[in-house]
Image (cartoon, rainbow, N blue to C red):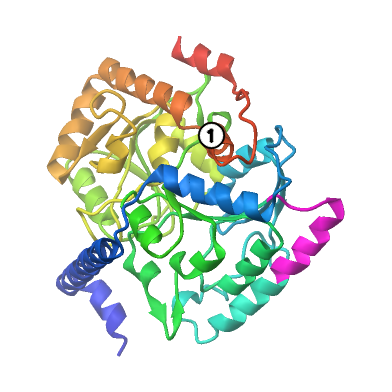
Amino acid sequence: MDWKKVAKKSSILNWINSNLKNYKLKLDLRNMSHYYKKKAAKLNFSYDANMAISEFKCWHKANAPDYVPLTEGALRVFWIGSNKDQDESGFLQALQRLANVTVFHDFEGEYGTWSGEGSGFESPYFEKVREINDGLLFEQLARGKDQGSFDLLIGQMWAHRISKEALSLVQKMGIPVINISMDDRLPINWGSKGDVRLGSVGLVSGTNLVLTTSSETCLWYGVEGCPALFWPLASSPEIFSPDEHNVRDIDVLFIGNKYGTRGKIVKYLEGNGVKVDCFGAGWPNGHINAEQMASLSKRAEIILGVGTIGHCDDLYTLKLRDFDAPMSGALYLTHRNPDLCKLFIEGEEIECYSSLKEALVKIQYYLNNPEKMRLVAEKGFSRACKQHTWDKRLNETFSMLGLVNQFPIKEKVSKVENWLE
């Protein structure tokens, strides 16, 4: 008998399973937080963002002493991605505007590192996965060097797909390594398999800087000996911003795979008369690509966000939709994530909820008060355009690290201004 299938069909067993997973995740995260705070005190280490930047610059000066900050388009970047739809929803296009980018491909020519056919951390042969990706990395670096040396390797990388030894060899070439880590509140990404550390932390000995979307883990990486910066995500006005031809014919839109609390939230709203159009794996409408996501977002009056992690209903992390949704000109309603509330003003630029009832009340209120809904949406859009574009995020980061000279950002200002009018 397949007990997993039985459990999924039983609401009681499914509820017990979800709560057990929720409890374990929060317990593990609490224990890790305690561990790193205790270790930081023992080491007399306190996190300082300026020190993290200084450490990166010092390494770079020592290992590439002749380097000078480059002009727009001159920086040669080797990018290692993971999710094509995610990266091509604005990030990669902005990186290619800023720099001369070479993109890593697997042995079949597909985008990003080979995953071992989705085997993940539990694969009995993830050493083989790393061996293959490591080999491809050096093959592609060697091919790219025909055009000159690379100035930076950056990617979204984990130790079960690529090895710290490979990244250390890249550093020995004088090339700094930056890793973007989006899931640092998942305890599994801080675990081990045998004597191998997993996640981004498993790569720190071959990494010069981690850009993390979880503010508290900057301290954790520092304790592990790797500089880190809190790095919110961003969006692309070229892809997501609306224009005068948009018709908003979707009351409430949710985009994301169906797991954890997401089904429960949608079921509650629909049970109380709110129609929610859902897209992503597990929903009847199924998976959509980046282009479809942008098109649908521009048709929504309200975009529903679910900012929780896994099966938890009170533990949050930043998501790409936290920036894409306001950029689309819709009113964005999501969980009250403290990190997000430092970037947008709740009640003025976005709206938040902590309970199903609060989400329902706010959706009903704004659908019945379209002028107030549009005012919040327009202010959220304005904030996203001014402070949370990928061009701005990358430009500021690379110039802060001494890799490029900061330059004016070329955005489609007229398109933005026309819509606001």
Give me the residue at 58% from left, 34% from top: 395
**Residue 170: image location, x then y, percent:** 67, 64
Drawn side of residue 95 relative to residue 8, left or right: right
Residue 163 in view of the camera: no
Picture quarter with the C terminus: top left
Residue 96 in view of the camera: yes
Give me the residue at 67% from left, 76% from top: 132
Magenta residue span: 136-151
Drawn side of residue 169 relative to residue 303, left or right: right
Vertical comparison of 123 with 155: above or below: below
Give me the residue at 75% from left, 61% from top: 141
Give me the residue at 73% from left, 36% from top: 73
Whether residue 150 appears in magenta in the rendering, the answer is yes
**Residue 175: image location, x then y, percent:** 67, 56
Could you tell me which secondary element the residue under label 1 belongs to? Answer: helix
**Residue 305: image location, x then y, percent:** 32, 43
Vertical comparison of 219 with 409: above or below: below
